[in-house]
Amino acid sequence: MRIAVLCPHLAPDLAPTGVVMTSIAAELAARGHELHIITSLPWYVDHAVEPGWDGRLVRHDDQPWGRVTRVHPFPTDKANIPARALAFGGFTALATVEGLLARRRPDVVLAMSPPLTLGPAGAVVARARRVPFVFNIQDVFPDVAIEVGALANPTAIAAAQRLERASYLAADAVTVLSDDLADNVRAKVGPAAADRVRVIPNFVDTQRIRPASRDNAYRREFGLEGRRVVMYAGNLGFSQSVELLLDAARAFADDPDLGDVVAVVNGGGSRRHELEARAAGLDNVRFVDLQPAARLPEVLAAADVHTVLLRRGLARSSVPSKLYSILAAGRPVLASVDAGTEVATTIERAGAGISVAPEDPEAFTAALRRLLAHPAGTAAMGAAGRAFVEGWASPAAVAEAYEALFLELVDRRRRRGRR
């Protein structure tokens, strides 16, 4: 089967969605499928096209399993919403043209959101090639942008919501990561199109990410030896309430029982400078740049407790992939998320940590104190999380689920054509 993929990131870019799509693509290629992946030039880390990749709008890279086409993402400041919208528009236009001009006709088109604009792009390419279109939703937009206040203009919100619904209805199938995200999308498309929404969870590679010693090169490099490490690893943007961790560190600063505790913020993003200013004067906080993907198992192993921090309302439209990696690493989780959402229910089912209400510094700090006060209990939580994900879908199983969906849609279209 020939599969056209439109996605915002792909290795060597370090964006979480790029890691997801890289793994899915590798597994589909291993199953004998031919892929044409249309994505961006690497730019995620510094929001600028990485050295060695600049100078051209479009680059083609032929592989034994197909082709990767990388187009310019026109990167801009994430806080500048109008500029970012224009950047998404430019990237999407180039991706659409490359999809339409591809030398071989695909059997199916898969597009990933965000950005939401890749929904119409995938639909246009699929319709022009007369093949099924599958729209994969990693985060539900514009819900996330509205919740964090990045999108506030009523006219812009209404336009984005119309685009969102039109993209869902243009797809032969919409895949989401969890049941609560499925409920979100089904409510928007209505009963007549509800059966298009399918749940295919993201995966965790339990072979690559596994429990390991805390005393590793990461700790030595960043001066963390002999400390109890509470870590946030990931993007530092509007969606993440990382200030909760900084406030807890401030509360711990004068507590002699917690003198060996250090908060580590591992990542980058539009709010990093703001967060660094907030942590000024705190000796128990470290900021570490986003690490190469190959170093992820080591980063995860270095922490005693990991955190998942989402602002109010966001856990209903976003499922951070870091949660599954934390569980695979055998580390306990402290999550600040809405009750009843995928993150909270997963932690509860696994017995892998504690979840508290979002944006509640007192509750977060109190929960963190409880975890740090009972090391045997936190170790048991980490082991329970590891046991829980060992029965989850592997990258190969997720690729197989996509393959089955593609074959179903292709067969359905073929049968309709005969009629």
Image (cartoon, rainbow, N blue to C red):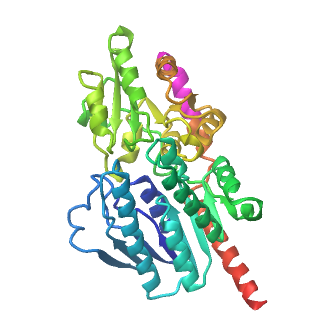
Magenta-colored stretch includes residue 50? no
Magenta-colored stretch includes residue 381? yes
Looking at the rendering, which quadrant does residue 239 occupy? top left
Which residue is pictured at 34% across the width and 31% down the height? 264
Which residue is pictured at 51% across the width and 37% down the height? 330
Front position in the image: 160 or 30: 160
Which residue is pictured at 60% across the width and 43% down the height? 316
- In the image, taking residue 57 as reference, residue 102 lies left or right, namely right
Q: Is residue 398 visible?
A: yes
Q: Residue 368: where, in percent of width, then height?
A: 48, 21
- In the image, taking residue 282 as reference, residue 261 lies left or right, namely right
Front position in the image: 415 or 238: 238
For the record, the magenta segment spans: 373-384
Residue 220 higher or lower than 249, as above or below: below
Front position in the image: 192 or 45: 192
Looking at the rendering, which quadrant does residue 192 occupy? bottom right
